[in-house]
Image: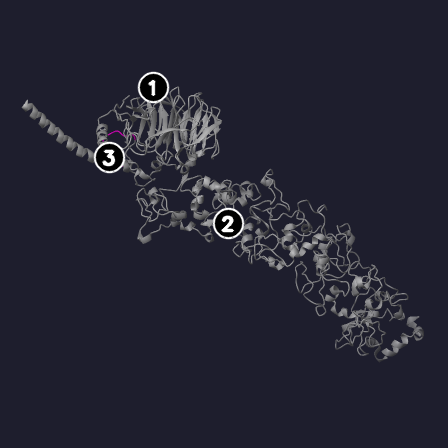
Amino acid sequence: MKIFERQVTVEKKSYGNHNIFIRYCCSFIFSWMIHLPFASAMESNAVKHIYDLPGSKDISLNLPSDIAIAPDGRIYVVDGGQHRIVIFKSNGKVDEIIGTKGSEKGQFLYPIGIAIDNEGQVYVADSGNNRIQIFDDDEDFVREFIVKEGDRKIKPVDIAISNDRKTLYVTGNNNHKVMLFDSRGKSLGQWGKQGNSSGEFRYPATIAVGKDNKVYVVDVLNSRVQIFEPDGSLHITAGEWGVKPGQLFRPKGVALDQKDNVYISDSYLDVIQVFNNETRFIYVLGENGNPAKFVAPTGIAIDSKNRIYVTEMLANKISVYQIK
Amino acid sequence: MKAVAKLTTLVSICIGLSSALLTISSVKAARQVESQRECATCHIMWLNEFKQNTETLIPYEPLPVTSSGKQDVASTERMCFSCHDGFVLDSRFMWENDGYSHPVGVEPSKNVVFPTPNDKNIFPLNNDGKVYCGTCHTAHSVDWKAKDAPIFMRSKNIDSSLCSSCHVSKDRNNKTGNHPVLKKLKHTPQDILNAGGKLGSNNQVICESCHIPHGGKEDKLLVQPLDESQLCQSCHEDKSSILSSKHDMTLLSDQEKKVLGNKYTSKGPCGACHVAHNASNGSLFAHWAKPGIDANSAKCLTCHTEGHVANDKLTGNHSHPVNVSVNDLGIDAKGKVWKTDDESNNNLKALPLFNQFGEPAFANGKVACATCHDPHKWSVKETNKKTSAKKLVGNGDSSFLRIPQENQSKLCLNCHVDKESITETTHNVKPESSDVKKGDAGICKNCHLVHNAKGAGLRKPDLGKHKSAQAGKTTSYFESWCLDCHKEDGVAEKKALKGHNHPVSVKPNISDAKTGVLPLFTTEGVRDHEGLVDCASCHNPHQWSPEKSKNKNTKSKEGDPGNSFLRLTANQDSVLCVTCHQSNALVFGTDHDMRVTAPKATTASGYTVKQSGVCGQCHAVHNNLPESGLWSLTPGEGSDNKEKQCRSCHQVNGVADAKVPLAFNHPSDVMVWAGENRVLNTKKEPPFTPVFDEVGHNPHAGIISCPTCHNPHQWDSTKNTKGNGKNLEGNVFNSFLRNKNTQNIICADCHGKDSLFRYKYFHHPKSREKHPLYH
C-alpha cells in the first residue's frame, strides 16, 4: 500500500485576525510544500464493505446527514429530510423512529447533527428549531434548550459531548462559532468567529471529541478540521484546501477510530480521508485497491468494533465498512 | 576576521535581498491563491492542480454539467448541494425525496418565450441551445436595482414573476385555462408552506405556491403529491370530501381511463376532472364538455352520458331544466341572499347560479347542475367513510346535494317557493308510506323525479296503467298521473275518481273561455296556451287553497269547492267554472241562481249554494252518476235524462215545485236535427237549439227535450246580462227560452206555419189526449 506521507499542518494556538501578509506567506509555503513529490494515496485496502442501511425497503431515508453509535451498539441516523431520527439495531433492522416534522417536544425541523454520550443519552441538533433536544436511551424526551447568542437564535449544526458529560460542544451555522453549554443548556463560553485564520471558522459543521477530550471541528469553507484543546486553544489543524490526496474541498464529517486516527469525509470529492493522530495524511479510504467512493458523504461514526458508518446524503443510505 | 566579517555581511545582504525578493513574490502568489480559492469554491476545475501532472481525488472534467452542455461544473447540482446541504446553507427541501427539478439539458418547449428586454436575452441557453442551470442562475452580480429578488437569479422574482416571464402560456389568467395566480387566499395553506411552497405578497397564490423549481415532490415540480390531491386540497379544503365519494375517480373509474394522457390514479381525485393549466373549459375542466346545454352542466354530462364513465347515472330525456332563471319562481337572486316577496320565505339559501361560460354568477345567473349539486361533496352531513365509494348509495340527503332533503324536500322548496305550501296539505304523504323511504327527497319525490322522469313536469314513472275516469277514453297525461293515487286501493282511495267527471283532453270553447288564466296542456303534459284541458287546468296539486293564507293545517280537513287544490274558487260565484264557461255566468242572479230562489237548498253532497257555488248547485265535477251534464242533484222523473235533470227541482215538493211543467213531451221516437245542422237554418244563425239522446248527449239528430228550448243559464235570450237577483215571474220572452221570437224556431222545421197550432194543440191536456200518438 502506498501511503502519501506529508505533514500539512500548522501549529497555531492563537486566535484573532492575522496580518494578511503572514497569511499570504503561509499560503505560499503551503503551496510550495504540497508540490513536493509524493506517492499515490489512492490505492487503499483499508476497509471492507459490510452492509448498507436501511437494509430493506420497509423504510427509506431522505437526506441523512449524521450518524451516532450508542453504547449498546444501536445506530442513530438523522433522517433530516423526514425530520426524524431513525434507530437501527446493530443487526441493521429498524428499532425505533423518533419524531415527526414540527416544533413540539420530540419533533424536529430539518435536524442535522447527532451525538450520544457514554451513558447512552442522545443529543440532536434540531437545526430548524434552533435548539438541542436531549433524549434518554429509551428515546424518551429529556429536555431541550434553545441555542442563542444574546437574543439571536443560532442554527445548531452538530453537537459533541465531553467524556465527563459536563460540556456540550455545539457548532453554530450562522455565527460561525463553537458554543459550549452544560447539560442544562447553560452557556459555558464560545470559541472562534467568522474568518479563515486559525481558530476561526467559515461554517463549522460536524464536531467530535477524542478520548483525550480534544475537540475536532470540521471547518467547511476553510476546508480543514481544527482540533482544539479542551480549554479552547487550537491544537492542530488537519487537511487543507485542494483536490489532491490529503486535501479537502467540502469536508463535512469527522470521526476517530480506536487508534485516534482522524477520518474526514468530503461531500464533493466523495471520499473519506484518514489522518493520523498528528494529522499526518495517511490514505484515502478504499477497498480492494480502489478508493471508496461515496455519494455526498457527510456525518461519519466509528464504533467500538472499528466499523465506520458513512451517511451518504444524496444516496439516502448509510454505508457500513469494517476498518482493517 | 575582517574578511570573515565582510563575507558575513555579503552573505547577509544576499540573504536579505533574497528574502526581500522572496517576500515580494510570496505576497503576489498568496494573493493569487486567495483569489483563485474564492473562485474555485465553485469553479473547481479552474484549479491549477488539474493542469499539473499530479494525482487528484476527482478527474479533470471541465465539460458537461448538463446532459450535453459545456458549462463548468460550478453550476452542477452536486456543487450546489455541497453547500446547500444544511452544513453551510440549508436548502435541503429542494432535494427531498430525490426531488424533481426544473429540467436542464433540454431544448425549451415551444410554449416557452424568453423575454428580451432591450434586445437582450436575460436567460441564456447553453452552447447547444438547451436549458442549463445558468439559464436562470448566476453566482455573479446582476443589476436589478432593487433587492427584492433572491440572489443567484438572473432576474427579479417578485411573486414568481421569473417563472411567468418565460412560461407565458401558463401565466396568470384563468380565462385561458390556467389556475389563477396573484389571487389573495382567504386563509394561509399551512401544508403548502410546510412542504416548501411559497405565497406571494399579500398572501397571494403564485407559481411557487404549487411548484418548487428544485426539490418538488411530484412530477411538474409540485410541492405536494397528487395521488390523493393533497396539493389541491391544501387550499381547497372545502372540496376535500370528494375523497372516497362517488366522484372519486381514482376509486371508481376504470383504472385505465386517462385525463389528458394521465391515469386517474396518478392525478388524484381532483385531477380526474381538473387540470391546472391549459384547460379547455372553464373551472379548469380537463375534458370535453357535452355541447348543447349550459356550460356548467355540460361538464357533468361529460361523464353522465351514455357510454361514458357515469353510464349508470344518466339524466334521461326528462330532467330538471337547466339554463333557466330562478327569478321566474319569484326569487330575487341578485345578491348572495335569496329573497321573495313573501317574508316568510326569506330564509332561503343562496344556491350558485351560472353565466353562459359556466362561471358562478349571482346576478342574472341561470340554474345548472351545480346549482343543486356540489360535485365535491357527497353529503352535507358527514360522509360515511366506512362505506367504500363503490358501495355508496345515494339518497335525498347525500347524492352531492347542496341542501339535504331531510324528507321535507328542502332542496326543492328552496327554489320552488310557490309550492312550499304543499307541505301542509293532504298531498304531503308521510315518509312512512310505502312509496317513500327514509332520507328520500320527501314530498316532492312522491310525484316527481328530478332525473329520468317519464314525462314533462318530471313525472315519476306510472305505477300502473289506469282506466280513464271518462268512459271509453284513454287517460289524459295528468289524469293518469293523478290516478296513481286517486284510485281504488291507491294512497288517495277516499278521493278516487269514479263515475262521470269533467271532461279532459278537450279544448275549451275559446270564444267562451277567459284564456290565459288556467293552464292548458299538450298530450305530453307541457303547458300550451292552445292546449287541452287536463286535471292540472283546474287543480294546483301544490296548493290547497287559491288563497295561500288559508293553507294552514289542512291535512285533516275535508275539502270543498273553495279549496281542494283548485286554482280558483268554485264556491260563491264559481269563478273557476265561469273562467271557461263564461256564457253560463249569465245564470247569476236569475231564478236558477239558488242564492236567489233557494239559498238554503242543498246539493246531494249537502252543500248550500254558498258552499257549492252557483254552478255547484246543479253540477258536480267528479264522481257523478248521470253520464251527462255533470249533474249533482238527484234526478226526477222524466222520459229522458235531460228532463230528469230538470225535474230534479221542477217536481212536486222540489225546489222549483212552483214551476213544474206539464209532462207533455215531444214524441221520443221523433228525431230532429240539432242546432246548426237544421236544414231550414240556412243562415246558420243561433239559437242552435240542441237535441239529445236518451243519455243526454248532443247528437246531430235526436229528441227534443227541455234544454232544446230552454237555456237554463240565461233568463232572457235577448239580453246577455245576468239576472237582477230577484225571483221573477217569466213570460214567453224570457223564462230561459232560447228563442227571442218565433223566427227560426225548431218546431217550424217540421211543422212549418202549423207549429204554433200544433204546440197549443198538443200541449193542452184534452186535445193531446185525442191524438193517437199520445194514447
- Mark 3 — residue? B33
Disc 2 or disc 1, which is closer to the eye? 1
Residue B339 lies, in percent from the top left, at 61, 56
Whole-number angstrom distance, CA of label 3 to CA of label 2: 60 Å
Q: Is residue B244 left or right of residue B586?
A: left
The foreground one among B525 and B446 is B446
Which portion, as a residue range, is magenta? B46-57
Q: Is residue B382 left or right of residue B630?
A: left
- Mark 2 — residue? B285
Q: Is residue B521 left or right of residue A101?
A: right
Residue type at mark 3: give it: Val
Residue type at mark 1: give it: Lys
* Helix, strand or loop at mark 3: helix
Q: Is residue A54 left or right of residue B401?
A: left
Q: Earlier in the sequence, mark 3 or mark 2?
A: 3
**Marks 2 and 1 on same chain:** no
In the picture, the disc for residue A259 is 1
Residue B587 lies, in percent from the top left, at 79, 69
Residue B548 lies, in percent from the top left, at 70, 58
Tell me which corner region of the image, top left, top right, bottom left or bottom right, holds residue B104: top left
Q: For the N terminus of chain B, give its image quadrant.
A: top left
Query: Does any portion of residue B533 appear in the rendered image?
Result: yes
Sort mark 3 into few (<14), some (14-19) or many (20+) by Cα contacts within 10 Å: some
Sort mark 2 into few (<14), some (14-19) or many (20+) by Cα contacts within 10 Å: many
Q: For the C terminus of chain B, give its image quadrant.
A: bottom right
Residue type at mark 2: give it: Phe
